[in-house]
Image: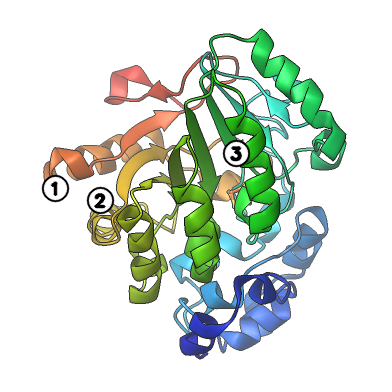
Amino acid sequence: MTQFLYQEQHWQSQLSDLVTNPQELLQLLNLSAEDLLSGAILATEQFKLRVPRAFVGKMQVGNPLDPLLLQVLPHHLELEDYPGFVTDPLGEEQANQQPGVLHKYKSRFLLTLTGACAVHCRYCFRRHFPYQENLPKNDDWLNIKSYIESQTDINEVILSGGDPLTLSNRKLQLWIERLESLPQLKFLRIHSRVPIVIPNRIDDELLSVLKNSRLRIILVVHSNHASELDDFTCSKLNQLSEHKITVLNQAVLLRGVNDSAEVLTDLSYRLFDAGVMPYYLHVLDKVKGAHHFDLDPDLINTIYTELLASLPGYLVPKLVREIAGEKNKTPLFGVSTFSS
Ligand code: SF4
C-alpha cells in the first residue's frame, strides 16, 4: 500500500473510492477470508463497511488484530443482542427538535448537516440513527435560525455527524456564514474523524474558511490509537494549530483497540506532537451491535488510574460517559462513581 499516493490524491477522490467490501479489505492486508466469518457479512447489511484507503494504509499487513482494523471490520457478534445495548443509547430521538437540530445541552446544540461519514466505526453510538428523516434541507435554515433565536442561552453550535467534513468546502462555508449572521453565536465546534482517516481533507481552502470565520472555531477530531497518527497526518493537523484553530481529540475506550494505559499514553503524546490536546476519553455507549468492544468497569478504573500516573495532567483526557437526558457528559472518577 503506497501511503505516498494518498498524500497526493485530492480528498474528494479518496472519499469516492472507499473500501466497502470486507473481502477486499482483507486482501489488501494479506489476510485470509477465513478471518471473516459469514455473520460479519450479514453485519455489513445492517451497517455498511466504509473505510478510506489512506486509513487502510496505516494498518499492519498480516495482522488480524491490528487496532485500526478492529475498529472498522464487521464482526458476527454485532448481530447478537445483549441486555442494555439498544439502538438509541443516548435518547437522541427525544432531543431531535426539528430536522438537523439535536438540543441536548444548555448553551450549545448539535446541527447534523449530513448522515455521511468517511469511515464507519463499528462502535458508533449513531449507527442506527435515522439520518435520512433528520437532515435539514436548504430551506430549513429559516426554521433553524428561528429556533436558535428563541433559545437565548445558545452561544455555540456543534456541527456533528455523520461527519460535517464530508461536506464540500463551499457547502461548509455557506452554513458557517449563516451561523455567523447570528450575533448570539460566539463559537463553532466541528466534530470530525475525516482529518484522521483522510488527512488531505485539511486543504488550503478549508484552512481559509476556518481561519476567516468571525466565530471561534474548535475542531474536535477523533483518534483512538497512535498508529492513526503517522507523520503525514500529524503534519496536516499541525497546520490547523498554525492557523490558530483549536484542535482537541476525543477517543473511545475500546476492548482490543486501546484498552491499556500504555497505548493511551502513546496516543496522548502523539496527539501533542500533532498540536492536538487530548479532551475526552469516552467509555463505550451501549449501542446495539457494539457489545464486543465493552470493558469491565474495574478494568477501566485500573487503566485510567495508570494513565493518570503515566501522563502530565495536561495530556490526560477526561474520562466521561454520556447519560441520556443529562445536561452534560458525566465525569467518571474511581470505582465508586460509576458502574456498568
Ligand atoms: S466517524 Fe463518528 S459519526 Fe461516523 S461512524 Fe465513526 S464514530 Fe460514528
Image quadrant assignment for residue 233: bottom left
Residues at marks 1 and 2 touching, judged by CB atoms closer than 8 Å: yes
Across and down, in percent, residue 340 comes to: 47, 28
Residue visible at 86% across and 33% down in the picture = 139
Q: Nearer the viewer, mark 3 or mark 2?
A: 3
33 relative position to 188: left or right: right
Q: Nearer the viewer, mark 3 or mark 1?
A: 3
What type is the residue that disc 3 sits on? Leu
Kindly state the secondary structure of the residue where label 1 is placed. Answer: helix
| Circle 1 residue | 310
Tell me, yes or no, if residue 145 can be seen here.
Answer: yes
Please tell me whether residue 130 is drawn above or below residue 245 in the rendered image. Answer: above
Density class for disc 2 (Cα within 10 Å; few <14, some 14-19, many ≥20) is many
Give whichever of 135, 171 is nearer the camera.
Answer: 171
Residues at marks 3 and 1 touching, judged by CB atoms closer than 8 Å: no
First in residue order: circle 1 vs circle 2: 2
What type is the residue that disc 2 sits on? Ala
| Circle 3 residue | 159
